[in-house]
Image (cartoon, rainbow, N blue to C red):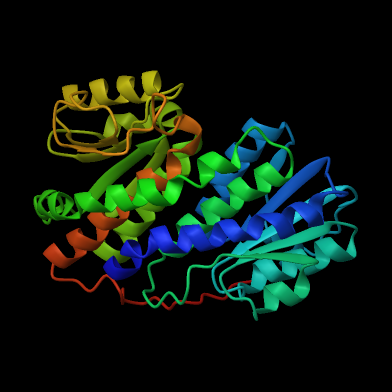
Amino acid sequence: MIEETRQQPEALARTLGEFEGLAAYLQTRRPRFIVLAARGTSDNAAQFGRYLIEITTGIPVSLAAPSVITLYRSELDFRDVLAVGISQSGESTDTNAFLKEARAWGAATLGVTNEPESSMTRICEYAVVSRAGRERSVAATKTYTSQLLAMYLLACALGGRCRLNDLRRIPDCVAETLSLESSIAVLAAQFKGASRALCVGRGLNFANALEFGLKLMETCYVVAERFSAADLMHGPIAMVESGFPVFAFAPAGVTWPSIDEVLRRVQAAGARTVVITERAGIAQGPAIVLPSAPEGPDGLEDLYTPIPYIVPAQLFAAHLALAKGLDPDQPRALQKVTRTM
């Protein structure tokens, strides 16, 4: 897991090469609606895609409920719809079943997978192959960030408000963020006694809160609750008490005020907070401050923070697992490919 986390700059740079073919496929297929289908880590990437595509293109996006088709056998009207499946292996049975039926009912179909010879690439009209290389760890890292990048490429191909030149800077930002690994390992070891935690984000980084929580659960066996900052304030914040670990994604930009309010509330309750940010000095406790500040004329703006921001969380989870004496590459009861219907 750690080695594959370190491979992400190269994986992202290779995945950027998928743009031209995708743009050509979508040139005459602008949809009125998009549906994203995925499970697990890929579903977190889909959650990000929903925010990104709606923010940048104005096209409404929904997350699929595959059981509507696989269990309830409903027939849906997919005319003028783009159905997008996201799967690292391309072998997610319910995601593929959703895509197959959606195509039969009139959808344009797009797959995002790391396996060019997978079932998904045969089912879909077009496939974006994330060029992450083989991922051996059960816990996904480089395939997750490659999927996020594929969502950016999709938004750009649909004429969205994002720029390829900015996307080309992300691999270097990730490489700089990886330089924080030794300090993150020291910080993670301070939480080796944790059995529960809270992960918080909002907007484009809400998906990262979901993904960080998933990594804590599957590699560290930490019961991690995952919330949007807004949803947290509607009740679940009551569970936070003295010593409760809270991890927050806090980029500069429109989501900062709500994250700041959460931090003030949980810190007042005595929570142990770790803030992932590019803004030094904002936290009353430990912070992981990204060296590639996504603001100002020489940095990335808020729209492009999610990929650099998840990397410290991936490293934290992997090193916390090691501090707990666990193997993050082989979590108990898990396999690399999960098949559900």
Residue 266 visible somewhere in the drawing: yes
Q: Residue at x 85, y 56 (%)?
A: 107
Q: Relative to residue 140, is residue 64 depicted above or below?
A: above
Of the pair 165 and 122, the residue shown nearer to us: 165
Q: Assign the N terminus to one quadrant of the image.
A: bottom left
| Residue 232: quadrant of the picture | top left
Q: Position of residue 106 (x, y in %)?
A: 90, 58
Would residue 123 appear left or right of 225 to someone viewing this image?
right
The C terminus sits in image quarter: bottom right
User: In percent of the image, x 77 and y 73: which residue is there?
Assistant: 123
Q: Is residue 225 above or below residue 201?
A: below
In the image, taking residue 27 as reference, residue 225 lies left or right, namely left
The residue sitting at 88% across, 47% down in the picture is 80
Can the viewer see residue 310?
A: no
Give how far across and how far down residue 133 sits, in percent: 47, 74
Task: Choose between 261 and 306: the one closer to the eye.
Answer: 306
Indicate left or right for 137 with 87 as reference.
Answer: left
**Spot occupied by residue 127 in the image (x, y as percentages of width and height):** 70, 66
Q: Position of residue 29 (x, y in %)?
A: 86, 49
Q: Quadrant of residue 279?
A: top left
In the depicted view, which residue is nearer to us: 23 or 98?
23
Query: In the drawing, does residue 40 fall left or right of residue 286?
Result: right
Q: Residue shown at 20%/54% (left/top)?
A: 181
Q: How many marks?
A: 0
